[in-house]
Image (spheres, rainbow, N blue to C red):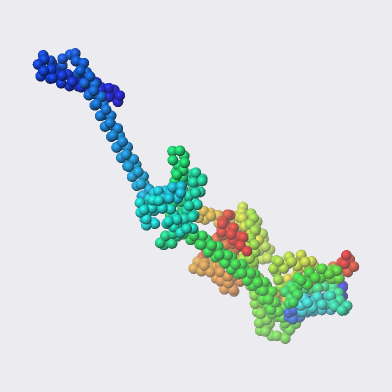
Amino acid sequence: MIDAPIVLVEDRPDDVLLTRRAFARAGFDNELVVLPDGEACMTALFPENGGRSLSPALILLDINLPKIGGLDVLRRIRADERTCHLTVVMLTTSTERRDIVDSYRLGANSFVRKPVSYSEFADTVRILGSYWLAINEPCPPERGRR
Amino acid sequence: MRQRTAVALIVVLISAACVADLALSLAASSGGGRPTSAFAVPLRMEAVLLGCVALAATWAAAHWQAAYTRDRHTLEQAREDADRLLKVIDNTSAVIYLRDSDGRYLLVNRQYEELFAIKRSDIVGLTDHDLFPAALADDFRANDLKALAHGAPIQMEEVAPHADGPHTYITVKYPIADAAGRAYAICGISTDITVLKHAEEEVRQLNTELELRVRDRTAELEASTRELDAFAYSVSHDLRAPLRAVAGFSEVLMEDYAELLDETGRGYLRRVLAATDRMGQLIDDLLGLSRASRVELTRRPADLTELSEAIVAELRAAEPDREPAVRIDVDRGLEAVGDSALLRLVLQNLVGNAWKFTAKTPDARIHIGAVERDGEHTFFVRDNGAGFDMRYRDKLFTPFQRLHTFDEFAGSGIGLAIVGRVVARHGGRVWAEGEPGTGAVFYFTLPVSSQQAVQEGTAP
């Protein structure tokens, strides 16, 4: 099990609370770093003045975010050799085809739609966590760099 | 003719001889000579000579008479011809005029006289520069010269001033040549096409207006599509988010705090959860409706038999132990041309409804097939379920209109609106027949090549 933090880029406190509970209930004790918008996510991944950059095991990215949108964040993550290897899962309410297509086109590892039902959502979080944190071997940073 | 003249000549000759003979006899008898018969033969030399002179005189007189008559006749004929031609040119609605090679008027018709209030006799010798503003006269002259140079009829549009404003004429001009082939005049025939011109202008204006209107409408349509797009997007994001919070925290309450509530409290909480579920479904259906309106149509041959069977299989899989059981027949070879993803929505809703509304029907039956109705290939989905009152058939395809209470049959009231929208976008029609307690039939058509459908299909 990877014990690096999980980054949740989400501006709705309700969603944060419910996601946090779902991860806890599913038995993942990774640190959950919550960033309220795309800009905060950029700052955390690419700190200025040589600060320590965040190296999360998983980034859960909403699409509809204040300041810098989720798809833009994804594009920048994939464009930078320091972050292009990171696992990014789009976790969003959108079911718009163009959002799904754009997400995959920009290099998202997965696209997950937040269901209205919480039990369904909890299931989704559990499956997401076990796949990306336990089952799947993440690409080591050196190889991702090329 | 020549024979008759010869006979006449002989008769005249004989008569002249007889007359001369008689005259000579009379002279002789009066002179005391022996009396002679007027028809005494042979005639004397003098008589013959006199006869010849008389004959020559007679012939000369006749010849002169004939020549005179012939000239008179030709003159009259010419006058008649001229008169006839004048009548022809005077009784036409066209303006006709003849000008010499220097532009001086030779002749105009009555229409010309009336239009420009000038007498035929007064215009002779004048030029257009005496009658019209210089620029206009220059134009007319230029056209005259063009016709002269061309040597054959040419056609042009000319504008001449009138009391009620400028009139447009379609004019044919051609040179008139003398026997030696030298063009000495130009004839012009001008027909007033002002009314036609106005009509043409009107049509042009209407077309321009129509174009503008189409452009406006298209812009409006694009704007409303964009709005719908934005609305759908916001529904899918913003409306769902608070709902997810309500549902989420209710479930958390149920999981973590259920024992702190009594049965009534837990009942309320269950109702909250059921309501959020329903609202989630409603939002999804609404998105489906908006998607059915927005998504671009791709027309390809679609196998409705195959689609229907897949849907039936899904319904059976979702409710394998359905009681009472339902018998479903899908006709072979149901072929259409359309967007199969959208047509799937149509069948999903129609077959889904039939499935739903036969849930309480013993010996339930659903039939998916096609018939010819009013010469149109018509697909149908028939069931023997709850049916509906025909009085409310207009409400069927309107969003959020439901003919059954939620407790009887659950639903958002959007399914048939989606059906209506998709069928309309394919240029087809959808309608229903039913009777409460007996069942319902939903019909729809999917025209193969309809202009409307093509336009709809390419709409943004």
Q: Residue at x 46, y 49 (%)?
A: B102
Front one among B221 and B82: B82
Instruction: Place residue A4 in its image quadrant.
Output: bottom right
- The quadrant the C terminus of chain B occupies is bottom right
Instruction: Kindly identify the residue that appears in the image at 37 percent across and 55 percent down.
Output: B118
User: Is any part of residue A121 visible from this angle?
Assistant: no
In the picture provided, is A14 more to the left or to the right than B158?
right
Q: Is residue B190 above or below residue B395?
A: above
Pick the residue in front: B416 or B315.
B416
Vertical position of residue A60 compared to residue B449: above or below: below
Q: Which residue is drawn at 58% across and 72% down?
A: B400
Task: Give how far across and how far down residue B378 sits, in percent.
Answer: 55, 56
- As displayed, is residue A14 above or below residue B114? below
In the image: residue B321, left or right of residue B373? right
Asked whether B147 or A17 is in front, the reply is B147
- Farthest right residue? A142
**Where does the N terminus of chain B fall, quadrant-wise?**
top left
Q: Is residue A41 visible?
A: yes
Image quadrant assignment for residue B419: bottom right
Residue B393 in percent (x, y) is at 52, 67
In front of the other: B288 or B295: B295
Q: Which residue extends farthest front?
A: B31
Image location of residue A79, percent across then percent down: 82, 68
